[in-house]
Amino acid sequence: MAERPARKAPKAHSATVVRTERLTPHMVRVVLAVDPGTGFEIGEYTDHYVKLLFAPEGVSYPEPFDMDRIREEFPREQWPTNRTYTVRSWDAAHREMAVDFVVHGDEGLAGPWAARATAGQSMHFLGPGGGYAPEPDADWHLLAGDESALPAIAASLERMPAGALVHAFVEVAGPGDEQKIVTPDGVEVTWLHRGDRAPGEALVEAVLALDFPAGEVSAFVHGEAGSVKELRRLLRLEHGVPRERLSISGYWRVGKTDEDWRAIKREWNEQVEREQEPSA
């Protein structure tokens, strides 16, 4: 049997840091100017994401950046590590992409990089991906998540049609982590302060207490995987929300590194879907 050829790596895009902004004590915005030669464009989704590529400390790659060449010439431990982040906004005229990072001191990889990023630094990334935007025909909208989902929730609120009925819940560490978000008239964000509670606990409690409006909902629910599982059960089993009207997944998992969570995420999600499939 002939050997299957190695799968070609997706094309990476190149960008340069333009500026950074400390939005709250735990969130930093990095604005990147994307090289027009890479053909990168953003579509109509409000949860578009990119995979930022970080070289291990002390490792540099030849230009032009080429993932296939890196895989051929560098040992695996020197390949870039990727981290997935939502595109907060895209300025097509200036080809500037804003990405918001949750920062907890020196914890993690991307957060500390964002906190120290300076104008002129280069960055390579893959993407974009995505699949959600507020459905214009929905009777009402549910947006729920923690800091990791805040950029997508904010982008979605800014795209809501006039007159939309929206219930938006965002769990953050405390009052200082709230952000001003442009919303349609009459739409307010319910900010939930975590304090010393477990991640997602306040979010689940708030959505459970919601008096669900009548009609078809378009729902976007993302954040810590354990809390997302509870909310998925509520939406799919108790309220019978059809799968096609529900964008839901765990962006991260308490007690798991990013690599550990990605290694089991697909299988974990598939198991949750099987457990929470409504009976015929």
Image (cartoon, rainbow, N blue to C red):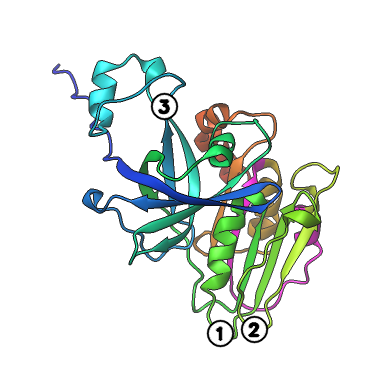
Label 2 near label 1: C-beta < 8 Å?
yes
Asked if residue 212 is among those painted magenta in the image, a careful observer would answer: yes
- Residue sitting at 63 percent across and 78 percent down? 215
Residue on which disc 3 sits: 55
Q: Which disc is residue 185 wearing?
A: 2
**Disc 1 on helix, strand or loop?**
loop
The N terminus - image quarter: top left
* Residue ID for mark 1: 162
Label 2, residues with CA under 10 Å away: few <14, some 14-19, many ≥20: few
Q: What is the x, y in percent for residue 3?
A: 17, 18
Count residues near mark 3 (Cα–Cα under 10 Å), then give few for <14, some for 14-19, many for 20+. some
What is the quadrant of residue 190 in the picture? bottom right
The reply to whether discs 3 and 1 touch (Cβ–Cβ < 8 Å) is no
Which residue is nearer to you in this view: 181 or 1? 181
Say which of marks 3 and 2 sits in front. Answer: 3
Which residues are drawn in magenta? 203-225
Q: Residue 192, image x and y in percent?
A: 78, 58
Q: Is residue 193 left or right of residue 186?
A: right
Tell me which amino acid carries mark 1: Ala
| Res 114 visible | yes
Q: How far apart are the alpha carbons under marks 3 and 1?
A: 44 Å
Q: Where residue 196 sits in the image (x, y, percent)?
A: 86, 42
Residue at image coords 82%, 64%: 209
Residue 231 tag number? none
Position of residue 177 relative to residue 209, above or below, is above
